[in-house]
Image (cartoon, helix red, strand yellow):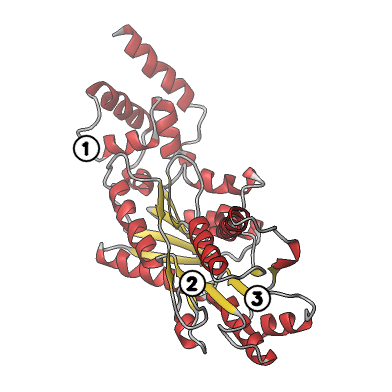
Amino acid sequence: MDMWYNEIKKVGENMDELKRDKMNIYDIAKLSGVSIATVSRVVNGSPNVSEKTKEKVLAVIKKSEYTPNVFARGLGLNSMKMIGILCPDISDLYMAQAVSYLEKRLHQYGYDCILGCSGHEQKSKEHHTKLLLSKRIDTLIMVGSTYAGIGNNPREAEYIRAAARQVPVFLVNGYIQGENIFCSYGDDFQGAYDITTALIRRGKKRILFLSDSRTYSAEQKLKGYEAALSDAGYPILGDLKFYTKNDIHYIQDILLAHRTLEFDSVLACNDSLGVGALKYAKARGIKVPEELSVTGYNNSVMAVCSEPELTSVDNHLEQICHDTIENMVKVLQGEKDVEQNNKIPCQIVKRCSTDF
């Protein structure tokens, strides 16, 4: 009993050092000596917590004089039923589709959402994350692998880990490891590997990798492309890794300007890039797929609006968004063992721009 009293006394002393208006779920978990998920289960009345742990966490909450509405931001108590969604650019077809899927599913569960568009710059992403957190949201959903960075600079994701100390964070189409961070994304490494292998099997030897970014998703596609080339005994050539901006006519013109660049097929990291490659082929009088095979990525509406229709890798965005909301609801209900690394297999959708 004395030991228990001393623990609570020590917690009280530590708590005095914190400003109460700055307290969040992370602070409660730290002071209690348990995980964020455990605090969530305690507050939501889950039976999967021992009585001793439950008493300790509740004692910390009581000692902190935490108001239910503030605590609800991370735990679903007296929830505002408001979800923050952050994406870099809502004019992007992939982003717009993802937000549409997410919003529809959220409404089915009675949630509203606030949308923020951050752009791709690091400072802007950090600023808009803080802005959404100030709106008393229940969770934060980040759409796009730009938020996951490329892994070369671990500090790029620190603002996301900081956000996860206040509310659960859900990442769509990217992966970051961290407590209270839940990720759903397509297996872009395998998707790119499979499409590259399919091109190689049709005798293609100079496959152009066409990308508009160096995000987590783009880097996974690049690794899959390189792995397939290596496994086939092909060299990885720097001149066949081509980076450009995501503009269909610009892609056509820039490829036309590089007339000395020889390639017999294209692996485009999204369908817009693929359509740009098709326009280049038409301008050059190159027959698709007889002389040039072109593949896209994301299986968007652009893939079926192009001429010829574009073979594309479907990373199952709708499933990614569905799983994101299902996992969000589980977390807010205090369930434990919610999947934090939800990797979804991709699928090649064959159309007329390839001959496999």
Q: Nearer the viewer, residue 54 or 316?
A: 316
Residues at circles 3 and 2 in contact by the CB criterion of under 8 Å: no
Q: Residues within 10 Å of mark 2 (few under 14, many from 20)?
A: many
Q: Could you tell me the amino acid type at mark 3? A: Asp
Instruction: Please name which of the two marks, 3 or 1, marks the residue nearer to the observer.
Output: 3
Query: Where is 36 relative to 176, above or below?
Result: above
Q: Nearer the viewer, residue 277 or 136?
A: 277
Q: Nearer the viewer, residue 97 or 88?
A: 97
Query: Where is 229 relative to 306, above or below?
Result: above
Q: Element type at marker 2?
A: helix
Q: Quadrant of the N terminus?
A: top left
Q: Element type at marker 1?
A: loop
Q: Which mark is residue 310?
A: none
Where's residue 218, x and y in %?
59, 61
Q: CA distance from mark 3 to mark 1?
A: 61 Å
Residue linked to disc 3: 264
Residue linked to disc 1: 45
Where's residue 124, x and y in %?
63, 60
N-term mark: 3 or 1: 1
67 sits to left or right of 176: left
Q: CA distance from mark 1 to mark 2?
A: 39 Å
Residue at coordinates 28% horizontally, 49% vertically from top-left?
330
Q: Nearer the viewer, residue 62 or 139?
A: 139
Q: Residues within 10 Å of mark 3 (few under 14, many from 20)?
A: some
Instruction: Please name which of the two marks, 1 or 2, marks the residue nearer to the observer.
Output: 2
Q: Could you tell me the amino acid type at mark 2? A: Tyr
Query: Where is 59 relative to 282, above or below?
Result: above
263 sits to left or right of 163: right
Residues at circles 3 and 1 in contact by the CB criterion of under 8 Å: no
Residue linked to disc 2: 94
